[in-house]
Image: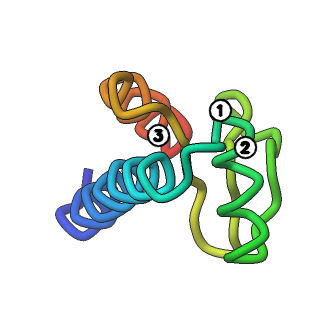
Amino acid sequence: MHTARMLKFRWILVWIVLLTTVFQRANAQIRSEADVISRIARHWNCREEVSVQGGRADLVTATHAFEVERASKWKNSIGQSLWYGL
């Protein structure tokens, strides 16, 4: 992979972990991953659950695809994000 592409993936993964953690701590009423995805989608005006070549991305903007997982499943989100980027 190109260095610039790897850097882009790293930033995306950092944002995924940070946003998931922030949203879970900010509102105790958030019960599921779907709640987090919906809140982020409304805030950023993203599309939810979009079919991509490698599966279904949780959130998609014009330039990025995001995978959202609970903090304890951060390894899963990395693997899925890398798979979507191939």
Q: Secondary structure at mark 3?
A: helix
Q: Nearer the viewer, residue 84 or 19?
A: 19
Image: 76 above or below 16: above
Image quarter of residue 77: top left
Nearest the camera: 81 or 22?
A: 22
Callouts 3 and 2 close, C-beta under 8 Å: no
Of the two numbered discs 3 and 1 on the same chain, state the one appearing first in sequence: 1
Mark 1, residues whose alpha carbon is within 10 Å: few (<14), some, or many (≥20)? Answer: few
Q: Residue furthest front?
A: 28
- Quadrant of the rendered image containing residue 82: top left
For the residues labelled 2 and 1, the Cα–Cα distance comes to: 7 Å
Q: Which mark is residue 35?
A: 2
User: Is residue 5 depicted above or below 49 in this figure?
Assistant: below
**Which percent across, then down, holds residue 2?**
24, 60
Element carrying mark 2: helix
Would you say the residues marked 3 and 1 are in contact, meaning their CB atoms lie under 8 Å apart? no
Identify the residue position indicated by label 1 in the image.
31
Q: Which residue is mark 3?
A: 81
Disc 2: CA contacts within 10 A as few (<14), some (14-19) or many (>=20): some
Marks 3, 2: nearer the viewer = 2
Mark 2 and mark 1 residues within 8 Å of each other at the beta carbon:
yes
**Is 74 situated left or right of 86 in this image?**
left
Query: Which colour scheme appears in the figure?
Result: rainbow
Q: Residue furthest left?
A: 3
**Amino acid at circle 1:** Arg
At a point 50% along the width and 33% down the height, the residue shown is: 69
Q: Residue at x 74, y 63 (%)?
A: 41
Under mark 3, the amino acid is Ser
Q: Earlier in the sequence, mark 3 or mark 2?
A: 2
